Image (cartoon, rainbow, N blue to C red):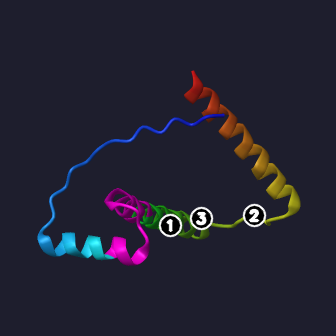
């Protein structure tokens, strides 16, 4: 299965102090180029937002009332439900 990745170009303007900082980060942290450095920053920010969303959802779940015991049957049912949802999503995106 091949995944095609289309890259977009974004141009940003930085003051000299930030440009110097980026160049130091590239030199000292092993980034190959400016794009690689900024992609890393964006992925980190994206992960932070995802983690925060998960935290909010977990807190909502904890405060939503009585829970369910996490038995092997519970996990099996949950995996089956997730597989069905993933299959529907895959079929929808391929059509």
63 horizontally vs 79: left or right: left
Q: Element at badge 3?
A: helix
Q: Closer to us: mark 1 or mark 3?
A: 1
Magenta-colored stretch includes residue 32: yes
Q: Element at badge 1?
A: helix
**Residue 11: percent from left, percent from top:** 21, 50
What is the C-alpha distance between the residues marked 3 and 2? 11 Å
Magenta-colored stretch includes residue 38: yes
Q: Earlier in the sequence, mark 3 or mark 2?
A: 3
What is the C-alpha distance between the residues marked 2 and 1? 23 Å
What secondary structure is the magenta-colored segment mainly? Answer: helix
Within-10-Å neighbours for mark 3: few <14, some 14–19, many 20+:
few
43 over 9 or under it: above or below: below
Q: Which mark is residue 82?
A: none
Residue at numbered disc 1: 51
Residue at x 77% of width, y 50% of height: 79
Q: Are marks 3 and 2 in contact (CB under 8 Å)?
A: no
Residue at x 33% of width, y 42% of height: 8
Question: Which residue is more in the foreground, 65 or 44?
Answer: 44
Q: Closer to us: mark 2 or mark 1?
A: 1
Q: Which mark is residue 61?
A: 3
Question: Which residue is more in the foreground, 90 or 15?
Answer: 15
**Residue 43: percent from left, percent from top:** 44, 60
Q: Earlier in the sequence, mark 2 or mark 1?
A: 1
Magenta residues (range): 25-43
Residue at x 57% of width, y 21% of height: 95
Q: Which mark is residue 68?
A: 2
């Amino acid at each position: 299965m091949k995944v095609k990745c289309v890259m977009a170009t974004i141009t940003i303007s930085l003051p000299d102090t930030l440009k110097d900082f980026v160049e130091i980060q590239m030199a000292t942290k092993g980034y190959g180029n400016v794009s690689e450095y900024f992609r890393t920053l964006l992925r980190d920010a994206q992960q932070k937002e995802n983690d925060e969303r998960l935290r909010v959802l977990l807190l909502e779940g904890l405060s939503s009332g009585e829970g369910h015991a996490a038995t092997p049957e519970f996990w099996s049912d949950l995996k089956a439900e997730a597989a069905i949802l993933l299959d529907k999503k895959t079929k929808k995106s391929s059509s």
